[in-house]
Each structure stands twice: as structure tokens, then as C-alpha cells.
Image (cartoon, rainbow, N blue to C red):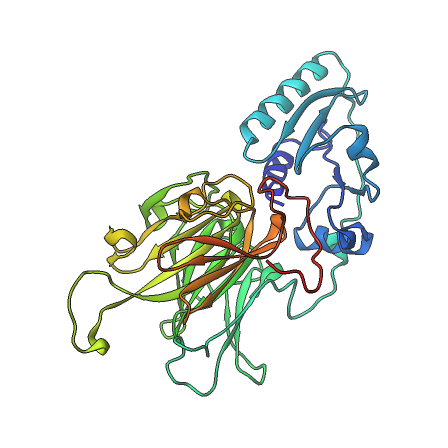
Amino acid sequence: MHILPDLKRLEHLYSVEDGLVVVGVHSAKFENEKDSANIAAAVQRYEISHPVVNDNVASMWRALRVQCWPTLMILGPRANPLFVIMGEGHFDDLKLYVSTAMKFYKDKGAILNHSLPMNLASSQVETSHLQFPGKIACSYREGISDGNDNPLYAISDSGNHRILVVNSEGTVLHRVGGKKSGFVDGDFRKARFNAPQGLAFQNDDVIFVADNENHAIRRIDLKAKQVTTVAGSGQQGCDRIGGKIGRDQIISSPWDVAVYRTRNLDMSFHSDESKVPLRDVIFIAMAGIHQIWAIFEEETIWWKFKKYPAGTCLAVAGNGREENRNNSYPNNAAFAQPSGLALNRDAKELYLADSESSSIRKMSLADGKVLAVAGGDRNPLDLFSFGDVDGKLY
């Protein structure tokens, strides 16, 4: 799905009347993705405005010898293949090829002034209080709640580009953001999100949000009723190292967040454990570049006694290659679109749903070691293996 923003940008630059027609061909990886109703729901969820073909038997995939998702094929006016682009992050090349081809064929008089009437699937979405909600988080978890017996629930109302905060009776207490996408900080009415996904409570008053299509991490303060940006600029990046602070650090398609409270490893001695300095680390499932990142809210001394200034955002695990590779050294491990995070605080482990490898992985929060839990294949390059068997031991 990371190719969709590039296609939207291209469609804004060139219209059907200009000579550009975008057609999506969906060749499913999983059985449920072959269902046209599920594809229509995805078209609505991602607000796709071009036609999408359901190639449910992968006939075009095989005929064109496609090898990976996504693959872009640029065709001329007579359906003659011109260029093939595989993978993501090639918008500049795509724009160059399309603009050059359009000028060439226009000069030859081969592009006619056509229109393409369409009934957009997005216009068929039924009105609802929630539109394709992506994630939910609860304030009442061990080590998180401030002792309030009435937990709060935060819902990422992804299709409506907002966050809803409700109580256990389902009463909406806060609506954060509007129903239109945008990238704006400020009070709850002014703030804007773009397809937010994962959320995590830091305490009863603060929520962190993976603002997916804004490529940003946002902070919601329920007391002050304010939204601020703690990482990301609104533009998708390809930095696989990080280390900058706040909006200066560009990130890519964050899909989930988790808040972990850890000791500050400043080597100080405390006879009273209650006086040991603690720091919050915000972990990020960075699906766009296949890594796990972290934000240090305060100055923190962590793994290998390295000091991180307040606000630092950087990669802590994954080399950025899309693989299912476990390793004792976190920077040598590899993930494939990690999309969900969960903490085992007692064991000091971060569990993650590694989407494209169809596996559950875990990372030690003591040293960063990455291990398999379930699913996937032993070959780290095999991302086509899926479907588990009851009783299989890992």
C-alpha cells in the first residue's frame, strides 16, 4: 500500500485528459484478498480514485512475469510496454518516465483527448460514526494506568482521520481531529491527522499516535487538549539510521507505537529502588522501512550505556531490508513491514506482528536480540510462506 501516495501524486500532476490512465491490478497473496468485496473495501479505505482489477488467479502476474509487490508497468498508447519499475520509493523515476513518454506521444499526435467516467467506490461508503477503525488502546494496563478504575479507550478512526477517546460505556469523551485529512498541530478542533493507526497511552492523560500517512508520531494531551508532533515532518523519508530530534527526523509509514518504562542506566547507586530514575521509550513499528525505531522523551542512557538527548528518534532494530531475519545483534536483524507491537513488561520483551513475513517476532529490551515466536519460514528471504499449523513448535 506504500505505492498509493506516489500514484496519487502522479494523478494530481497528470489527468486522464492529459493522457495518463492509472489502473491497479490486484494479484492476491492471501485467499481472503481474492474476494472482490474485500478489495472494494480496501479501495474505499485507501480512497483510491482509479480503477482496480481483481486478478484473482494471478494470470496477469504470470503472463507479465511479475516478481514482487509493487510492480509498475508503464504502457504506451497501443499497450506497448515502455518501462517496468519494481519496489517502492521511485517517484522521481516514475515522474520522469511518464512525463517523457507523454511528451513523446503527444508530439506524435498519438494521445487523444479522452475522458474516463468512473463511479468511485469511496462514494459508496455508508455513513457511520467510525470509518475503517485501525487500532485501539486502553489506558488501564499494568505499569501504565495512574490508578484510575475507569479506563479510557483510544480508537484510531482511520477513515475519518481522527482519534476518538471513549469510556468503558462507549461514551465519546474527546474527538481529536476532523474528518478531513491534514497535518496540523493545535487544539482538538484544529488538529488534523492522515489515516492514523497505532496508539499507546503513556498515562491517563497522554496518548501517542502513529500518524501513518503523515509519516509522523503525534502526542495528544487530554488535559491541555492539545496535539503536538514529536517526530516526522509530514513527508515520507528513507533514512534508516535516524538520530535527529522532533520534526527534523523524517520517518516512514509508522504503523504502531508502544510506551516502555525503563531504568536510566546512569550507573548511579540507589539503596531505595523507588528512587531509581525511570525513562519512557516510545517504540515505533516503522513499516515503511522495515525497522523498529524509538523516541527518547527525556535524556536517556540505555543500551551499551549510550546517552540519547531528549527528543532523539532513531532506529534500534532492523537493517532496513525486507526480510524475516533474526539475529542477536538488533542492527543485523531484518523485518518485513512490522505493523503491530505489544509489550511483555515482566520479561522485558517487545512482541511484533511482522506483516509481510506472516510471523510473530520478539525483541529483548535488555540487549536487542531478535527471535522468532511463530509463523514465517526458516529462509529469511522467503516472504511467501504463510499459514500456520496447530501444534507446530518453534
Image quadrant occupied by the N terminus: top right
Q: Nearer the viewer, residue 386 or 61?
A: 386
Q: Position of residue 303 (x, y in %)?
A: 30, 54
Which residue is pictured at 79% across the width and 44% down the height? Answer: 118
Can you give x and y, in whole percent of width and height, for residue 385 in the image? 68, 47
From the viewer's perspective, tell me whether residue 125 is left or right of residue 243.
right
Q: Is residue 392 visible?
A: yes
Q: Name which quarter of the figure residue 323 lies in.
A: top right
Residue 15 at what x, y percent from top left? Answer: 68, 33
As drawn, 149 above or below 114: below
Is 81 on the left or on the right of 170, as rendered? right
User: Would you say 65 lies left or right of 314 here?
Assistant: right
Residue 90 placement (x, y as % from top left): 56, 30
Q: Quadrant location of the C terminus? A: bottom right
Residue depicted at 48% across the width and 82% down the height: 151
Outermost residue on the top side: it is: 108
- Along the line of sight, which residue is nearer the eye, 207 or 354? 354
**Number of numbered labels in the structure image:** 0
- Residue 184 visible somewhere in the drawing: no
The residue at 63%/48% (across/down) is: 377
Point 72% across, 50% down: residue: 43
270 sits to left or right of 73: left
